[in-house]
Image: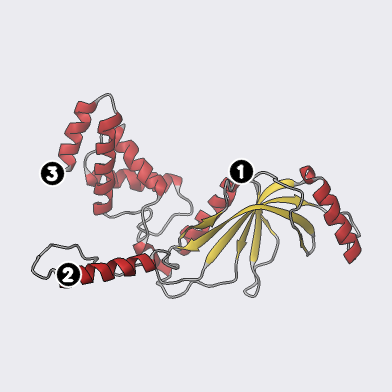
């Protein structure tokens, strides 16, 4: 990655870890690397408007101090919270209400035999508390000797009076909270969804190269992941090694979507028919 992250706290099981990055892209790349190494995965739980492209809206922002060997001040412009994909199910209440309605309807019309689809496994949401917090910040370096409370108040006042002097960075906070209630380690990747880059590669190979065989697609994806994903992910991580069923689904999706947008519709229609066999 282009920029070098700064570890503002030594790794300590009793402290949060804070890293600073020059861009959101660098921060996301670091998080993805950690996901691969640990077989964990995070999804966006909450994000402020325009996160990553936030602008200064007023001079009343709170000025925060970070102490240590190299103390600094920062103003937060926006934030994003990443939750473990085994975290809290935000739609749990809706699902329960839907299930109650379905059960009631079934009891009222027990004579109507309707085929229903049942999930083979329960929800992967396990209320895991692990999270990562990203903050879009402006960083300011205080003058040497600014140690007293009065000095700090004056420094904070100076910051608010001219926010343009701040350097925009992305702060990543790894809270001191362990993953809980779900499988970890080697087997943790078995329940992961396909990576967006892998899904995009499937679409590219179907639409541009006409790949129509699932086994051939698997070979292409293995080569793609080997060349482009570091560190090398576990072979059991479905994020980068999707099952044939998942690959076929994305191949069909890409082929059918291509039929609506490609000039060469005849070839794509034929491809859809091959994939449907």
Nearer the camera: disc 2 or disc 3: 2
Using a 10 Å C-alpha cutoff, classify the residue at mark 2 as few (fewer than 14 neighbours), some (14 to 19) or many (20 or more). some
Residue with the mark numbered 2? 106
Name the mark nearer the viewer: 1 or 3: 1
Q: Quadrant of the C terminus?
A: top left
The residue carrying mark 1 is 53
Q: Earlier in the sequence, mark 1 or mark 3?
A: 1
Taking the spot 36% from the left edge, 65% from the top edge, the residue there is: 94
Q: Is residue 190 above or below residue 274?
A: below
Mark-to-mark CA distance, 1 and 3: 46 Å
Q: Given contact means CB atoms under 8 Å apart, are the residues at marks 2 and 3 in contact? A: no
Q: Residue at x 44, y 68 (%)?
A: 88
Foreground of the two, 69 or 167: 167
Going by the image, does 8 lie left or right of 228?
A: right
Please determine whether, in this image, residue 233 is positioned above or below residue 125.
Answer: above
Marks 1 and 3 close (CB-CB < 8 Å):
no
Name the N-terminal-most of marks 1 and 2: 1
Q: CA distance from mark 2 to mark 3?
A: 36 Å
Question: How many numbered discs, if any?
Answer: 3
Local secondary structure at mark 2 = helix
Identified at 86% across, 61% down, the residue is 152
The percent position of residue 117, horizontal first and vertical second, equals 19, 62
Which residue is at the front of the view, 60 or 205? 60
- Residue 277, disc: 3
Q: Regarding mark 1 in the picture, which secondary structure is present there?
A: loop
Name which quarter of the figure residue 114 lies in. Answer: bottom left
Q: Nearer the viewer, residue 256 or 11?
A: 256
Q: Regarding mark 3 in the picture, which secondary structure is present there?
A: loop
Residue drawn at (43%, 64%), measured in percent from left and top?
A: 90
Q: Which numbered disc flags the more N-terminal residue, 2 or 3?
A: 2
Q: Dot 1, crowdedness within 10 Å: few (<14), some or many (≥20)?
A: few
């Amino acid at each position: 990655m282009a920029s070098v992250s700064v570890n503002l706290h030594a790794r300590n099981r009793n402290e949060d870890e804070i890293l600073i990055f020059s861009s959101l892209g660098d921060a996301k790349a670091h998080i993805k690397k950690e996901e691969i190494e640990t077989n964990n995965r995070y999804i966006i739980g909450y994000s402020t408007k325009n996160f990553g492209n936030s602008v200064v809206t007023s001079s009343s922002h709170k000025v925060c101090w970070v102490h240590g060997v190299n103390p600094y001040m920062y103003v937060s412009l926006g934030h994003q919270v990443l939750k473990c994909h085994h975290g809290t199910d935000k739609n749990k209440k809706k699902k329960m209400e839907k299930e109650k309605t379905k059960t009631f309807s079934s009891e009222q019309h027990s004579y109507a035999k309707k085929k229903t689809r049942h999930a083979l496994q329960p929800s992967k949401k396990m209320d895991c508390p692990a999270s990562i917090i990203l903050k879009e910040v402006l960083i300011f370096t205080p003058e040497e000797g600014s140690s007293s409370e009065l000095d700090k108040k004056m420094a904070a006042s100076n910051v608010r009076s001219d926010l343009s002097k701040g350097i925009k960075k992305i702060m990543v906070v790894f809270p001191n909270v362990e993953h809980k209630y779900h499988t970890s380690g080697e087997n943790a990747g078995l329940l992961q969804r396909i990576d967006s880059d892998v899904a995009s590669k499937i679409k590219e190979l179907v639409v541009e190269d006409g790949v129509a065989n699932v086994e051939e697609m698997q070979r292409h994806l293995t080569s793609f992941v080997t060349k482009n994903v570091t560190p090398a992910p576990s072979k059991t991580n479905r994020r980068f090694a999707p099952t044939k069923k998942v690959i076929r689904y994305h191949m069909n999706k890409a082929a059918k979507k291509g039929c609506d947008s490609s000039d060469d519709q005849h070839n794509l229609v034929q491809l859809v028919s091959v994939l449907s066999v």
